[in-house]
Amino acid sequence: MIRLKRAVLWACLMAIAALAVLSVYGAFLGADRAQTFFNSVPVAVFWGAFAVLLGAGIVAFGRLLWVPSLLLMHLGCILVVIGGMWGSQPGRDLQERFLGTERIAKGRMPILEGTAENRVAIADSNVTKELPFSIRLRKFRIEYYEPGDLYIYSRDGRRWKLPAEAGRSQTLGRDLGRVTIQRVFRNFRMDISGDERIALDAPGGSNPALEVAIERPDGSTARRYVFLQRAGHNNPSDPLALTYSQSVRDYISELEVVRDNEVVASKDIEVNHPLYYGGYHFYQHSYGQNQFGDYTILMVVADSGLRIVYSGYAMLMVGIVWHFWGRPLRSALRNRRSNERDENR
Amino acid sequence: MAIKYTLQGLLIYLTIAAFLAAFVSTIARRRTTGQWFFTLGFCISLASYVYRWIDGRHVPLQNLFEVFLCLGLVCYPISLLARRGLRIGGQWADMLIAAIVLFPAGFVFHAEQQHLPPALQSWLFVPHVAVYMLGYIFMAMAAARAAIQLATASQPISGKILPFEQATYELIALGFPLLTLGLILGSIWGKRAWGDYWGWDPKELWSLASWLVYAGYFHWRYMFGKKHPRLNSLWAIAGMAVIIITLLWVNLSRLFPGQHSYAT
């Protein structure tokens, strides 16, 4: 029996080492090729053997059965591996063949603003499948951080960043002088009356721009307009290049789920906040614009095996915390109490 | 080399100086002075972290500069826990670790503030990164004890202090649940943000590899106990080496493009 236990332990150690080596190898492959590699048949066999080995460990080592924390840890690992295999491509192929479950595993859905769509382009193939309901895109919008930033570049590679607020200034050193943001326009327009040009913030429309004053070391001052939507022209002899940009805060698609011509659910989805309906998660994936207007691209994912994996996570976490933190803490508290009792006697 | 002529930079350099002073004092057997410097360094690093937080308007865990700032901050409390709660010696190593982890923040990475991209605007952002940072420092301190055990083969003189091999085990046992939690939180976050609980991203795979090294350590130690203390220590050091690769090489090298590249 001792020999068997030792053999199982050595096999477990070898399996852990092999998985660590495979992980490192997968990291060098990159995410896409690693996914293909870890879903390949030989590695699927390894996953199966790994789960069996964990099960054999539980059977061979009585301690794993009567110490709940150890049992939870090892059962949790088994569940994670089984859930992962169940949700993998080979796992789904087997489900389709033997259980007849035909679900869209993963795909993309481009939807034009104001239209509804139920076709999903399946990932890594030219196949399109249909959902039993449609998703309508009411509106797609991008939100930006306010204010934007003025970036100042020198020819020798230095860079400064300045919040796009009137009155903000940046000293660039003795050789370059100083830059000050004088005005911020939401909708910049230049009026010409006679010989005079007047920059103004016109109502309506959107043409964000900054008026920037550059105080040169020789005492002269130049005025420049920097636009958010256009890169603008930089004179080759100019020692500074200026750009005005805003960082994206969020991408939001306002969605409605339509079934039998009725809206049955709706949600404004954004990154980290997908829509869940009919066993599928719909994620904000990408966006674009064509001749018909703005469109969003949703990622559609079925959650095959997810509950098994999450149950495994919960068991693994509870087991590990209890084993490595809970048990020592409990024994330390017991020792302290017994010491106190001894001192009181 | 990026020297920072800012208040943030000044606070970082003062912290490094205090931690180095603590290290030198402790090595020179001025333990009380060393403790004072260590505490002072922690106070300054706390001020530096809070300053960054207020200035950036989000918890500073977004990029490598902020991550190293956080690593420098958590060294002192973890060292205190190890000394008071676990009777672990070798605090001078913790002081040195604290100074070393602040070096990249002070001299290597740029401190320019960045807005949080949409993917990082999640309640999972802070716990996922924070538990990893705490876990990494536990493992770094464990690796330091392992290295001391390998280098000196000596044991602490006082009987109240744990032997270095045992100290290594205790620290890894405290850090391992944090690595596990970090891995699981990252997986749940990946599902919420990108649709996959496991994306086979290089960072994920290196994190899994580091978790597996420590899982292997526990199985090895269960098999052989303290029969091969040097091998036990080597195992702990190997784990730390994989963590360093996960934290730095994966983010900085072009070999590993992936979903965690914004963390640079």
Image: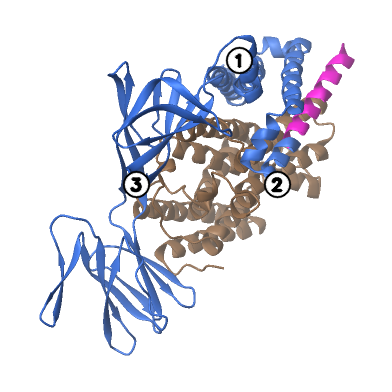
Chain colours: A blue, B brown
- Helix, strand or loop at label 1? It is helix
Q: Quick check: B226 above or below B62?
A: above
Q: Residue furthest right?
A: A3
Q: Is residue A296 left or right of residue A84?
A: left
Q: Quadrant of residue A137?
A: top left
Q: Is residue B145 visible?
A: yes
Q: Which residue is mark 1?
A: A96
Circle 3 crowding by C-alpha within 10 Å: few under 14, some 14–19, many from 20: few
Q: Quadrant of the C terminus of chain A?
A: top right
Query: Both on one chain, marks 2 and 3?
Result: no
Query: Both on one chain, marks 1 and 2?
Result: no
Q: CA distance from mark 1 to mark 2?
A: 43 Å
Residue B182's x, y, as percent?
55, 34
Mark 1 belongs to chain? A
Tell me whether circle 3 and circle 1 mark residues in contact (CB < 8 Å).
Answer: no
Residue at 81% x, 25% y: name it: B223
Earlier-in-chain disc, 3 versus 1: 1
Give the label on residue B241, or none.
Answer: 2
Tell me whether circle 1 and circle 2 mark residues in contact (CB < 8 Å).
Answer: no
Highlighted magenta segment, given as a residue range: A1-20
